[in-house]
Image (spheres, rainbow, N blue to C red):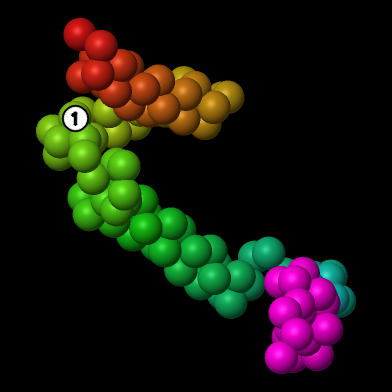
Amino acid sequence: MPETSDLSTMFNDAGMWAALIAACIGTYLWRGLGVFLSGKISQDSELFNWLSAVTYAMVAALTLRIILLPVGLLATVPMPIRIGVTVLAVLVMISKKEKRMVPALLTGTIGLVLYGLWINYI
């Protein structure tokens, strides 16, 4: 059997193109449906309030999972450091009424970077 390059095999594989087209159709179908229905949904409805609550709950759960059960490089940071940086970022976030998300994210990021520099270079 003649040897072909991986690139030519990839572009000749009809299954790959079919999967890509199906993924695009699925993505844009739901996006289009969302745009179509967005004008018909009241932001004050019970359904919208429920969806907002579920969304916030999922974000909170995933954030806690990342802090308490990290995977990868964050798992090398001790738990007290992770919790301390999180508390510091939350304090920054609740300290102001406006424009608080970016400073809180920067506080958490800079806190973990400083910890990494302290461990590796001091």
Residue farthest along the top direction in this orientation: 122
Q: Is residue 81 shown to the viewer in this render?
A: yes
**Horizontal side of residue 118 vs 19, given as left or right:** left
- Residue 94: image quadrant is top left
Closer to the camera, 73 or 31? 73
Q: Is residue 47 magenta?
A: no
Q: On the picture, is 60 further left or further right than 34?
A: left
Residue pictured at 38% horizontal, 28% vertical: 108
The residue positioned 27% from the left and 28% from the top of the image is 85
What's the residue at 51%, 72% (across, down)?
Answer: 50
Q: Position of residue 44 (x, y in %)?
A: 64, 65
| Residue 7 drawn above or below residue 102 | below
Q: Is residue 93 left or right of residue 70?
A: right
Which quadrant: the C terminus?
top left
Q: Crowding near pointer 1: few (<14 within 10 Å), some, many (20+)?
A: few
Under circle 1, the secondary element is helix
Q: Principal SS element in the magenta part?
A: helix
Residue 52 at what x, y percent from top left? 53, 64
**Vertical order, 72 against 62 (above or below):** above
Membership of 22 in magenta stretch: yes
Question: In which quadrant will I find the N terminus?
Answer: bottom right
Q: Residue at the location (54% across, 70% down)? A: 51
Amino acid type at image mark 1: Ile
Report the front residue among 25 and 15. Answer: 15
**Quarter of the image where one finds residue 111:** top left
Residue bounds of the magenta highlight = 1-24
Viewer-proximal residue, 15 or 76? 15
Left or right: where does residue 120 sit relative to residue 109? Answer: left
Q: Nearer the viewer, residue 3 or 30?
A: 3
Residue for badge 1: 81
Residue 105 lies, in percent from the top left, at 46, 30
